[in-house]
Image (cartoon, rainbow, N blue to C red):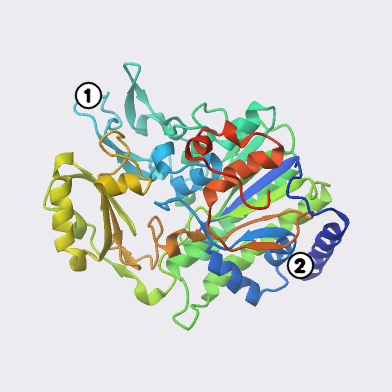
Amino acid sequence: MHPSLWVIVATVLTFASQVFSHDGNKIYKHVAVFSVDGLHASDVEKYLNLRPNSAIASLLATGFEYTNALTSGPSDSFPGTLNQFTGASPRTTGIWYDDTYDRNFFDPGSNCKGPAGAEIQYAENIDYDSTKLFSGGINATKLPLALVRGKCTAVYPHQRLRVNTVFEVVKGKGGQTAYCDKHPAYDLVRGPSGKGLSEGYFPEIASVANNVDSIIAYDQLHVDAFLDWLDGKSPPNAEGNLTGVPTLFGGNFQSVNVGQKTKGYQNAPGNPFTPDLLKALDFVDASLGKIVQKLIFVGLLESTLIIVASKHGQAPIDPTLYKGIDPLAVTNSTKVDVEFQTSDDIALLFLKNQNDTEKAVGNLNQNRAKAGIQDIISGQRLKYLGYGDPKTDPAVPDIIVRPDLGVCYSLSTKKIAEHGGLSDDDRKVACFVSNPTLKKTKYHHRVSTKQVAPTILKAFGYDPAELQGAAAENTHFLDGF
């Protein structure tokens, strides 16, 4: 946004904050939810120091900032998304990662024959043609299979989810909903009914070059969709039938995520942003400014709650800590048969024989240094820490390996950071809400992005207990509401 235009927007926000009461119990007509994937809580403060007159600074001037918010553990994009839209963690949603394993599923094309147990990957791999920006959507022949009431059935991402989403609740009450993200696999947010979205918009990011400039151009498609929705219009190639400004809408930005993975932070005190990462942040900031400007133009700013909460962070922030280790260093260290392993800056292990768990843990302990292991979680600790029980839940891994900060179980030379793990760099994310009627407030105690989901329903005046996952985990709305 041109600086003079942002001055006008900031003036409107400041004026509104003086005119309206500072009401955390206000009922809103619209809620807009944005994830700046990868954005840490610490990045917000760094950015404000560099850009004190930014759109983000103005949003925070009339908003609540949660400086100690944690996303899901694991912090992969799928559970990070569902944290915000179900109010529940992987043990309740059943969604651990976009590439994981389930002991009750079968491989695509298997006709559910042979022993159960299959990789569950929901990314560009299930598109008709992931080389195209609009890939044709989800190809059912590429989906994992499960026996549903005795019938071998292809399972879409939304069907694997065990609890409802905020989109389903809002749409069930007559509202319209819209969402955009990086793969058609984000069909996930439709919820188990499959009816949670009035409209979905899923250009395929895998068709785009993996550099900051290309991803900024990709993210612009999302921004254009947000602006179209505020005009009550559908962007080209959207799926669904939107007939007005959606009651609940949102989506993500990928440019910061890619900037962190490819260029990252400087090796200097405080780890300042590299130029490419700062360029990505400036783009996101300008985009948020355009959204606010559009809300003012269509007369919806005061009736809209804006939520910015990142699905995940990125580790490590300090570039000197990054170390790639062959995933087989973990697999082989168990010295037992591993059926499947998810590997990023975490390792989720599913053993062929669950009775080998104790033996595998003992062997991993003997190879901590070689495999860069900080912690090994299994057995009773899995249950105690809230991950669930692999003996009774087919989606729960037998062992979670948390590596040392900076270790990524990958030999890729194309990245210098990753997410999915359990460190603060992975999980301590940006989280704030804004509306002209809110008084600038910072909350420094620990909160969870799970609390975004019941906050959305509270903002509409709905009962947060209508969210099955939030009710199951006793998730409350965010402070200030």
Q: Element at badge 1?
A: loop
| Vertical position of residue 144 compared to residue 149: above or below | below
Measured as percent of width and height from the top left, residue 438 is found at 75, 55
In the rendered structure, find residue 2 and report the number of the disc placed on it: 2
N-terminal of the pair, mark 1 or mark 2, is 2
In front of the other: 105 or 452: 452
Which one is in front in this view, the residue at disc 1 or the one at disc 2? Answer: 1
Tell me the distance, in whole angstroms, between the alpha carbons under discs 1 and 2: 60 Å
Measured as percent of width and height from the top left, residue 466 is found at 58, 31
**Where's the N terminus, which quadrant?**
bottom right
Three-letter code, disc 2: His
| Residue at the spot of label 1 | 113
User: Would residue 219 be found to the left or right of residue 469 on screen?
Assistant: right
Three-letter code, disc 1: Lys
Residue under the image location 50 percent in, 45 percent down: 83
User: Would residue 382 be found to the left or right of residue 9 on screen?
Assistant: left
Measured as percent of width and height from the top left, residue 117 is found at 24, 34
Q: Residues within 10 Å of mark 1 (few under 14, many from 20)?
A: few
| Vertical position of residue 66 compared to residue 42: above or below | above
In front of the other: 384 or 244: 384
